[in-house]
Image (cartoon, helix red, strand yellow):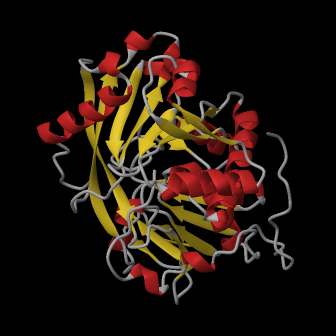
Amino acid sequence: MTGHPHHFRPANWAERPLRFAVVGGGVMGGFTAASLIQAGVQVTLYDPNAMGTGPGASVDTGRSFRVHYGNDQHLISMAVRARRLWSEWSIRMGWPLLHETGKLLVEQQGDRHALESWRAMRDMGLRADRLSEGRVAEEWPGFRADQVTVDRLGGVLDPGVILAGLASWLSNEGIEWKKEAFEVKSNAVRCGGGWSEYDQVVLTSGAWTQRWIDVPMEVTRQELVYFDASALGERLNRLPVFSDLASGFYAIPTVKDGRIKVANHHPGRAGHPDGDERKVSSEFKAQAREFLSTHLPELAESKIELDYVCFYSGTADRDFILDRTPDGLIVGAGFSGHGFKFGPLIGRLLAQMALGIQPEVDLNRFSMTRETLIGEATKIAV
């Protein structure tokens, strides 16, 4: 992209270049930095690892994109905005970032969430269907389910491709890369070279957020298993993401490596990427295989090609934290396993906060002092 749009610039734009820092170089930090650069400010991004590498939550080969959120029209609207931004970034990077396959909610008896999702999407003029077993088999040969709700706007995002492309774009636009931050304030960051001052600092450090601020979230281990899906041939390219609300299991086709990723969205046990052995249990592998074989019987004996443990940074109500601390540090955290799809939008919103602009989305529900952050964790659909 050439040139920078000026719609982010605050009215009291200073004559000197503004300097901003982003601490945490995953998808949220990367798109925050990109949105700030689009506003014409100087940006330094701190992370001990190159973008798209290391132990952070943004490293993977397949993430689900969905618009359905039950009857939560606020999140549905945000997902639609994010989808438009993924399209814009696809143009900038020169290749499609969202593999549009659709997203299936496998319905169970009395499944209110699927029905509410279908109704809300239809009411908002979005593409959604409900299909019975025969229609499912006709559209996706070999896939078995008695009834599904289809989010036609869903698909698959590849974090590796996205973050590599974003890192290249940021470098071309003149971002300053620095390694690990040791201390973080609202207007200064200390790393190995000492303190650097900024007009504003944004913290997007995922599971490491609590290193610097006291934020109400829990880091949990989430086990992942990748099955060989080459037996599906060309059908893998059309296979949608599919999930089951009751069990929490979901599956994401990762076309480029011929696999299907199976994981569970319900929060796992407490853990942290620093020091965790990342060993997947044999019990989880068996449960993942059972889920996959229920819906794709021909993969019942497929080889497990990779198993892995990632980490959710979850809040009790499963909503995000997009807020400013009392001393002025801007924080994006607690994405609870469903934040990646919103990456370009979250980055844009955090940049607007940093620039003193009214965010284009109402962020009141994402306050770090809301009452629903205290209490038993909520299970949300995937």
Nearer-the-camera pick, 354 or 58 = 58
Tell me where residue 92 appears, x and y as whole percent.
74, 37
**Residue 69 lies in what quarter of the image?**
bottom right
**Residue 304 lies in what quarter of the image?**
top left
Which residue shows up at 49% across the image and 53% down it?
25
Q: How many marks?
A: 0
Tell me where residue 209 appears, x and y as whole percent.
39, 68
Which residue shows up at 42% across the image and 80% down it?
373
Nearer-the-camera pick, 247 or 173 = 247
Tell me where residue 274 appears, x and y as whole percent.
23, 56
- Position of residue 370 relative to residue 302, above or below, is below
In this picture, residue 21 sits left or right of residue 14 = left
Residue 317 in sight: yes
Tell me where residue 170 appears, x and y as whole percent.
64, 45
Q: Quadrant of the N terminus?
A: top right
Residue occupying the far bottom of the picture: 326
